[in-house]
Image (spheres, rainbow, N blue to C red):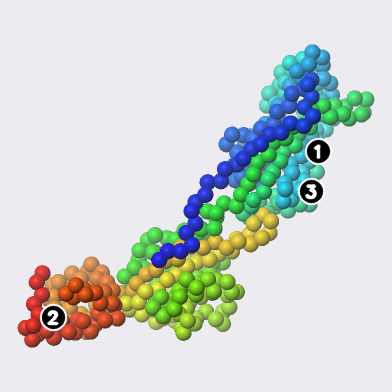
Amino acid sequence: MVNNIFNSILILLIFSVSAVAQSTDMELDIRMDSDFSQEDLSEMFSAVIEQNGAAQFFQITAENRSSGILRNNFVILEIHSEAFGTILTAEQSSSGFFSLNPGGQITFSNLSITEISNLEIQGEPEFDLVITSNGRKLIQNLRRGYLITDDLFTLNVRIEQDIMDNRETVTQESVSFETALNERELVIETDREIVAELMSLNVSNEAPEFSWSGEQNRAYRLIIVDNDRAQNADALFSERFAREHSESDIRDEQAGVVLDVIASESSYQIPDRFAGLFEPGKTYAWQVQSTKQTVLDNFVQAYTDRLEFTTSFPIEGEIRELLVNIFGEERTNEFIENGLLLDQIQVDGATYSKDEVLQILREMSEKIENNQLKVVS
């Protein structure tokens, strides 16, 4: 039985552009790069803060559509978030004021000039930055790898003009994009090889090892349940994960909790002292949980699928003797080499559970000895 399956969701950024008080003399355009995704958010902030020639995340283009010269223009960029408010403001310093002749154009990639035509500029444009306290929190949390949540970001751009030390807004434009919590981050993938090895595990010879994909130095909670003992395995998992883990409560044999442990890495080898907790021919379910932090400093839970495995009866002792009596030495050795799982047995169309296998084998062996049964290969 597999529970808690999260379907992978493709996160689509939704861009919207709005013009406010667009000047008829100057045309302003701001757009996000076509390949931009929310995974680029941290790098975008770094590019703005460091004002380097990193990858392009957004582009600002201003063009003089009038017949006269538009002098002493400068750019102001504000990045805003619905969740955090204003993140930062970047204002072009006077050393980079530019004048556009008729038809003149200037293009910024992030905050670096990439194209110019028919203009005059006073030095290399530089931007003075003001980062808010909430902005610092967001940027730091992004750099720490915290999960991006549902939010709406807006880049507001204004072109202002300096006329005799008086500032006047010429035009302004904005572009917005949405982010969303990626539900794939809430799924912990399991190691397929380990899952396969758990099936038909001979617990008489080796203790189970559990493994999953995940970050190192992260705490993972592993719960293993005895399906044959638990009255309602689904409810038991939910109840255990809902409560805080306690080292004094890692087992509950009566309820069916085999182990409830914390692993400091993405695998857990059952210690020798717990190896005897697993019995041959029983079905166990297991699931892993981990807590992740979002940029909003909230916590969300990530899970593996809920998986099952059935341990095999070791073909030794009485069971081996019975199989040899029924099938012969050679065929029994083939069973052992092929990893026979004595989970159930069918006789005359009737299926018997693993708990009844030993008794059925005894009865079959006795009938063969009394010439009441013949096995045909």
Compare marks 1 and 2 and give the one earlier in the sequence. 1
Q: Quadrant of residue 337?
A: bottom left
Name the side, left or right, on which 59 lies relative to 11.
Answer: right
Q: Which disc, if any, is residue 17?
A: none
Badge 2 local density, few (<14 within 10 Å), some, or many (20+)? some
Residue at image position (35%, 77%) is 282
Q: Is residue 121 above or below residue 324?
A: above
Q: Circle 2 — which element?
A: helix
Residue 145 appears in the picture as rendered: no
Name the side, left or right, on which 370 lies relative to 277.
Answer: left
Q: Which residue is mark 2?
A: 325
- Residue 80 lies, in percent from the top left, at 74, 44
Badge 3 local density, few (<14 within 10 Å), some, or many (20+)? some
Q: Which residue is mark 1?
A: 128
Q: Which residue is mark 3?
A: 132
Three-letter amino acid code of the residue under disc 2: Asn
Q: Nearer the viewer, residue 331 or 242?
A: 242
Mark 1–mark 3 Cα distance, whole angstroms, equals 13 Å
Residue at image position (64%, 44%) is 178
Name the side, left or right, on which 164 lies relative to 213.
Answer: right
